[in-house]
Amino acid sequence: MRARRQEIHNQLAKTQNRQEPDAPPRPSVAAIEETEKFKGPDAEPTHVQKNEGERNFETAAAEQAAATGRPQPAVLEEIREKLRSRSGRSSSPPSRRARSIGRIVWASS
């Protein structure tokens, strides 16, 4: 009984995902393609945003240094290493989302 149910379920899944070759694109796909026309390149962060990011970075490091009792330069370097390992690159700009919301937590080495 379970095998028969699974077989019917698989057949249904195959037919639901199939689209006729000459059918117009689904509305969601058409909307995404339409918006792609208007997307431009990511804007580089402004000087003010970079300064704010640096301040946020140093403030976070100072808070962590005060909480752990470790020196702030060591905490700064540790945070930089975490950021490098998280991004998979040795130096990378902040993510698009971070730039768009203005909460840059990145400092250049």
Image (tube, rainbow, N blue to C red):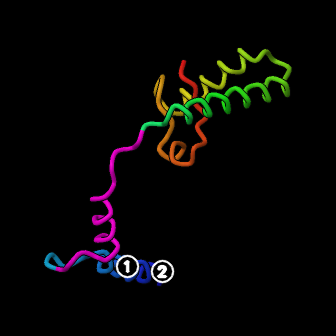
Q: Quadrant of residue 20?
A: bottom left
Which residue is at the far front? 48
Numbered label attached to residue 2: 2
Mark 1 vs mark 2, CA separation in Å: 9 Å
Pointers 1 and 2 in contact (C-beta within 8 Å) = no
Q: Is residue 24 above or below residue 43?
A: below
Q: Residue at x 49, y 40 (%)?
A: 95
Q: How many marks?
A: 2
Based on the displayed image, in which of its 4 quarters is residue 13 positioned?
Answer: bottom left
Q: Around disc 2, counting alpha carbons within 10 Å, would you say few (fewer than 14), some (14 to 19), or many (20 or more)?
A: few
Could you tell me which residue is drawn at 85 percent across and 28 percent down?
A: 67
Q: Position of residue 108 (x, y in %)?
A: 54, 22
**Numbered badge on residue 7:** 1
Q: Tag 2: residue type?
A: Arg
Local secondary structure at mark 1: helix
User: Which amino acid, mark 1?
Assistant: Glu
Left or right: where does residue 41 sit relative to residue 76? left
Residue 78 in picture, x, y percent from top left: 66, 21
Q: Position of residue 27 (x, y in %)?
A: 31, 77
Measured as percent of width and height from the top left, residue 59 is found at 73, 29
Quarter that holds the C terminus: top right
Quarter occupied by residue 98 = top right
Q: Earlier in the sequence, mark 1 or mark 2?
A: 2
Q: Magenta span covers which residues?
A: 23-43
Would you say 104 lies left or right of 3 here? right
- Specify few, some or many for label 1: CA neighbours under 10 Å numbering under 14, 14-19, or 20 or more: few
Q: Residue furthest left?
A: 22
Residue ID at (75%, 18%): 72
